[in-house]
Amino acid sequence: MDKNARNDLSVGAEDKASMNAVLDEALVNDISEVLFSQPQIEERVAALGAQISQDYAGKEPLLVGVLRGVFIFMADLVRQITIPIEVDFISISRYGPSRRTQGVVRFTKDLETSIQGRHVLFVEDVIDTGLSLRYILRSLQTREPASLRVCTLFNKPRTRLFELNPAYTGFDLPDRFVVGYGLDYDERYRNLPFVGVLKDGAITEQRLPDVP
Ligand code: IMP
Ligand code: MG
């Protein structure tokens, strides 16, 4: 595509003024700050894809994503991977009174693919407490993959309750609730092309969502 045409289509997320010019106010009014712009994310995802292509050459890895938050990252990441791969998804629900308390995790959609003997790369949007991921990894490990590693776009190392070290991390995040690029609050904001912080007033403890 012509480079200029592409620029016309992409949202200028460099400052709030240009965001507001393009995106509906109902979508951006609750955002206090853009943490990662669309070009910043693109560049980092390209670097992750290049590294994964190099590390998994000859292994035809299976990338497993957890719905729904990961769908945009997964779509962009796989197009930056230059070796043969396969993709599958799971879905989980987590019940608990708040995001900080240990809830019950269960699969609401399991893999379609057998992972026995496969090189599995688990792809996450954000690791917060690590509760969801710990549950998922334990379950996948019992199915005897040849290898099992984690790639997360965002990592909140300061809020971790369980030790988990992703092999690939896009960005470290402060302990703040962020939305956009697939990440939601109450199912909203997933379609923002950048990642931003929700204003404090937009979040109430009672409305904190179950994950993912
Ligand atoms: P964990 O089990 O506490 O690690 O939670 C991970 C899940 O919580 C992610 O897959 C997201 O669905 C959700 N989550 C955690 N932090 C955020 C955030 O800042 N914004 C949106 N979703 C988040
Ligand atoms: Mg969520």
Image (cartoon, rainbow, N blue to C red):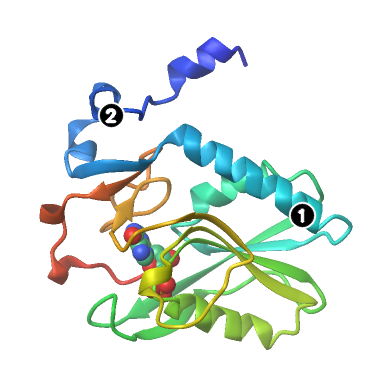
Residue 168, percent from left and from top:
61, 60
Residue at image point 33% right, 51% down: 179
Which residue corresponds to mark 1?
A: 85
Residue 159, percent from left and from top:
36, 73
As drawn, is 175 to the left or to the right of 10? left
Which residue corresponds to mark 2?
A: 23
Residue at image point 28% right, 59% down: 176
Q: Is residue 126 visible?
A: yes
Residue type at the position of mark 1:
Ile
Residue at image point 57% right, 73% down: 165
Q: Is residue 212 visible?
A: no
Q: Quadrant of the N terminus?
A: top right
Residue at image point 62% right, 47% down: 77
Q: Is residue 34 above or below residue 58?
A: above
Circle nearer the N terminus (1, 2): 2
CA neighbours of label 1 inside 10 A, class few (<14), some (14 to 19), many (20+): some
